[in-house]
Image (cartoon, rainbow, N blue to C red):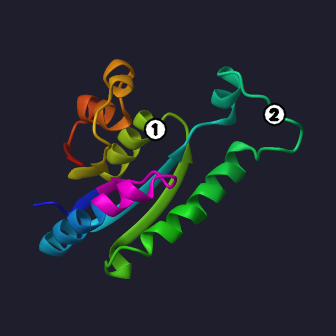
Amino acid sequence: MYKTILVPIDVTEDALTDLVIPHVEAIQKLNNANVHFLAVTAPISNYLRYGGTILPGDFPDDEKQAEIILNELKEKVKRFSLPADKIHVTSSVGSVKDEILAIAEEINADIILIGSRHPSMSTYLLGSNAASVVRYAKTSVLVIR
């Protein structure tokens, strides 16, 4: 049923990763599915847009930033008990929602498994990444809390 699973991981949120582990493992085992892990980080320009200041040399360019986040993601993926030949890991720089949806289409994902915190007033008003993915995804999405 689910041959290709997309699992977006926020490498700064260990609690969310812990939530999705048993679900990913169970669905993968049940379907012998390929699991694509994805980490997305916002571009440095977003940081600047919201009032951040950067001194020369403080932050890497987008390519280096994607490499750093990929290495962090590889460490997180080690916590999953999955067959090595079924694991695919990638990272990107951009809008979280847009990158998740683009990769889901690219790999023809059958389902997206995404962890989410309990809603709060700020996520209700501004929207969360999980809510945005649910709203715009062309495939099934399982939100894990």
Residue at image location 81% in from the left, 34% down from the top: 54
Q: Earlier in the sequence, mark 1 or mark 2?
A: 2
Numbered circle sitting on residue 63: none
- Taking the image as shown, residue 104 lies to the left or right of residue 69, namely left
- Taking the image as shown, residue 70 lies to the left or right of residue 54, namely left
Mark 2 highlights which residue?
54
Q: Nearer the viewer, residue 44 or 33?
A: 44
Is residue 10 magenta-colored? Answer: yes
- What range of the chain is rendered magenta? 6-19
| x, y percent for residue 55 | 87, 36
Mark 2 secondary-structure assignment: loop
Tell which residue pokes out farthest to the front in this image.
121
| x, y percent for residue 87 | 38, 71
Mark 1 highlights which residue?
96
Tag count: 2
Quadrant containing the N terminus in the rendered view: bottom left
Residue at image location 36% in from the left, 39% down from the top: 101
Q: Residues within 10 Å of mark 1 (few under 14, many from 20)?
A: many
Q: Nearer the viewer, mark 1 or mark 2?
A: 2
- Taking the image as shown, residue 51 lies to the left or right of residue 53, namely left
- Callouts 1 and 2 close, C-beta under 8 Å: no
Query: Looking at the picture, which amino acid does disc 1 mark?
Result: Val
In space, the residues marked 1 and 2 are separated at their CA atoms by 22 Å
Residue at image location 39% in from the left, 21% down from the top: 126
